[in-house]
Image (cartoon, rainbow, N blue to C red):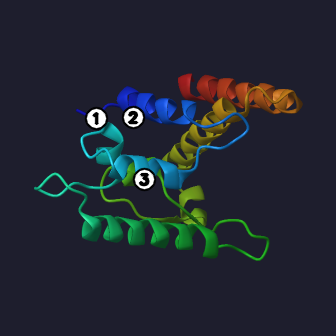
Amino acid sequence: MRTKSTVAGELLALASQINTGDKLQAQQVVDWARSHPKSALYAALCPLGTDGKWDLVKAAEEYLLHQARRLIAVHIVDEAGARKVVSLSVDRVSGGGYRRVKDVLMDVELTAVMLKDALAELQRVRLKYETVQALAGVWRELDRVKEQYRNEDAA
C-alpha cells in the first residue's frame, strides 16, 4: 500500500545514502524504484498495468498532458508576460481546463475562487521558503490579506 509517508520514508532513506555535499537526483530515484518494484516509490512514479509493472504507454500519455498544461500556462500570456488563462480548483474536480482571466474577473464567485486558489498557492510557497528571513515581510502581508479575505467572507 502506497502512502505519502511511505513514499517520503523511501525518499529519505535514499537521500541518507548520498554523500555529504552531494545531491539526491531524480534519476537516482527512478533507478532505485526500477530496481525495487514492490516499493511505494515504484508505484508512485508511474501508473501500473494489470501485471503490476509500469504502464509506460499510459505514463507517456500523462506526460504529454502535463506538457500541454505547461505550454498553455507559459505561452498564453499578454505582452508583459502575465497569464491570460487560469486553471481554477473548482474546474479541476470535473476534468480541468483553463478560463480566460478577464472572464473570471467579471464573475464575483469565480474571482473569489481565484483569490482562494492564489492564497493557497502562496501558502505552499511560504512552507517552502518560510525560513528565509528576507521574506518575513512577505509572509506578514500574506497573513494580512488572508485575514482580510476571511473577514470579507464572514461579512
For mark 1, what is the residue? 2
Give the amino acid type for the residue marked by disc 3 in the picture.
Asp
> Is label 1 in a helix, a strand or a loop?
loop
Identify which residue is drawn at 38% across, 59% down: 96
Residue beneath the point at 65% across and 66% down: 83
Give percent across and percent down for residue 155. 57, 24
Q: Which labelled disc corresponds to residue 31? A: 3
Most extreme residue toward the left, as rendered? 50
Pinpoint residue 88: horizontal percent, then vertical percent: 48, 53
Residue closer to the observer: 154 or 32? 32
Residue with the mark numbered 2: 7
Q: Give the secondary structure at mark 3.
A: helix
Amino acid type at mark 1: Arg
- Badge nearest the viewer, 3 or 1: 3
Q: Is residue 9 above or below residue 124?
A: above
- Quote the CA–CA distance across marks 2 and 1: 7 Å
- For discs 2 and 3, the disc positioned in front in the rendered view: 3
Instruction: Check whether the beta carbons of the residues at disc 2 and disc 1 lie within 8 A of each other.
Output: yes
Location of the N terminus by quadrant is top left
